[in-house]
């Protein structure tokens, strides 16, 4: 996949990984529609990128908003080649997470991807090409200590990306799934769990002590390299692969190790 000349949509592009991806795409010769719930932030990022970027405020859990992004991209730049389902949120803690916290995490982290694919895949099948890139998390391959909704919905995001690849990978549609650990974004700084609680502190500590905290620009470079090579699993933290192998090799041993890790974080 060559980035130059392509048309892309990036959600959650008002800051963090999404903004860095948009910059990297534009510098690579792509034209990009940026979306974010924060309309001022996404407009500022788009303005800084010039005529090859358009910023649109809106909630990408809404199918009408997603359709609007696609329509705008097609009107201004041409058919959409790449869709970066990057917008994501944290969630509640454990069994005390509210129904609203579960619902919000499912909507943003999973169902927004489903709705985007539902709108894009039919036209991609007609064209014989298209690329769906999911920003999940290492939590989707491993788990997220401290937050059940985040862990569960990121697992689901990985699962949906896998299903897309299996179902449409031999029909010209490419899929990548990005699974980083710590990245210096508002999600990490503000807390995977938005409340100041012991669970929120535990969740952040679990991420920041597991490996390096990368800059969004570092992650964007790795993602674009992975997309160019058409790799399904893109791991900005390569050590995640070894952790995943330990998990699949001996599930019980891995669970025991995660319990020990959790206990150590609490001390």
Image (tube, grey):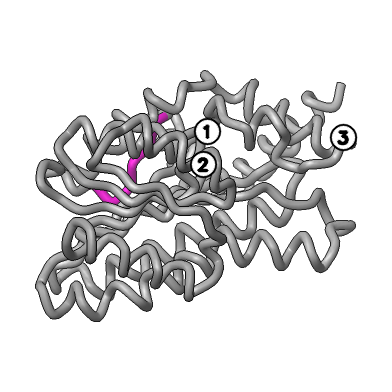
Which disc number belongs to residue 89? none
Asked if one can make out residue 141 in the rendered structure from this viewpoint, the answer is: yes
The image position of residue 57, as x and y in percent, is: 51, 53
Q: Residue 17 lies in what quarter of the image?
A: top left
| Alpha carbons under labels 3 and 2: distance apart | 23 Å
Q: Looking at the picture, does residue 84 appear above or below residue 222? A: below
Q: Which residue is mark 3?
A: 196
Which disc number belongs to residue 138? 2
Q: Nearer the viewer, residue 46 or 136?
A: 46
Drawn side of residue 110 relative to residue 35, left or right: right
Of marks 1 and 3, the one in the foreground: 3
Which quadrant is home to the C terminus? top right
Examine the structure image and report whether residue 244 is included in the region drawn in magenta: no
Q: Looking at the picture, does residue 104 appear above or below residue 201? A: below
**Residue in the image at 20% along x and 59% along y:** 81
Q: Earlier in the sequence, mark 3 or mark 2?
A: 2
Q: Nearer the viewer, residue 203 or 252?
A: 203
Drawn side of residue 17 relative to residue 171, left or right: right
Q: Nearer the viewer, residue 245 or 202?
A: 202
Drawn side of residue 98 relative to residue 115, left or right: right
**Residue in the image at 39% along x and 30% along y:** 219
Q: Are marks 2 and 1 in contact (CB under 8 Å)?
A: yes
Regarding mark 3 in the picture, which secondary structure is present there? loop
Of marks 3 and 2, the one in the foreground: 3
The image position of residue 115, as x and y in percent, is: 45, 73
Q: Which range is magenta?
A: 231-236
Q: Earlier in the sequence, mark 2 or mark 1?
A: 2
Examine the structure image and report whether residue 234 is included in the region drawn in magenta: yes
Q: Which residue is mark 1?
A: 181
| Alpha carbons under labels 1 and 3: distance apart | 21 Å
């Amino acid at each position: 996949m060559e980035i130059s000349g392509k048309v892309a949509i990036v959600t959650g592009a008002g800051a963090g990984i999404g903004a860095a991806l948009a910059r990297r795409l534009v510098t690579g010769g792509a034209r990009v529609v940026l979306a974010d719930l924060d309309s001022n932030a996404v407009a500022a990022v788009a303005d800084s990128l010039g005529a090859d970027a358009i910023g649109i405020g809106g909630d990408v859990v809404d199918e009408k908003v997603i359709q609007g992004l696609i329509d705008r991209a097609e009107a201004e730049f041409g058919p959409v080649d790449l869709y970066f389902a990057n917008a994501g949120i944290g969630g509640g803690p454990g069994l005390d997470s509210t129904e609203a916290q579960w619902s919000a995490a499912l909507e943003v982290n999973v169902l927004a991807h489903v709705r985007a694919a539902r709108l894009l895949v039919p036209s991609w099948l007609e064209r014989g090409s298209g690329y769906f890139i999911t920003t999940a998390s290492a939590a989707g391959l491993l788990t997220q200590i401290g937050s059940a909704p985040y862990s569960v919905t990121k697992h689901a995001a990985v699962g949906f990306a896998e299903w897309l690849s299996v179902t449409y990978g031999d029909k010209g549609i490419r899929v990548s799934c990005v699974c980083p650990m710590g990245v210096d974004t508002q999600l990490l700084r503000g807390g995977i769990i938005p409340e100041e609680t012991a669970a929120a502190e535990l969740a952040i500590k679990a991420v920041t002590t597991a490996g390096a905290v990368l800059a969004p620009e570092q992650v964007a470079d790795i993602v674009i390299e992975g997309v160019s090579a058409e790799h399904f699993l893109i791991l900005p933290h390569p050590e995640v692969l070894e952790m995943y192998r330990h998990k699949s090799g001996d599930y019980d041993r891995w669970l025991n190790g995660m319990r020990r890790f959790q206990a150590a974080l609490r001390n």
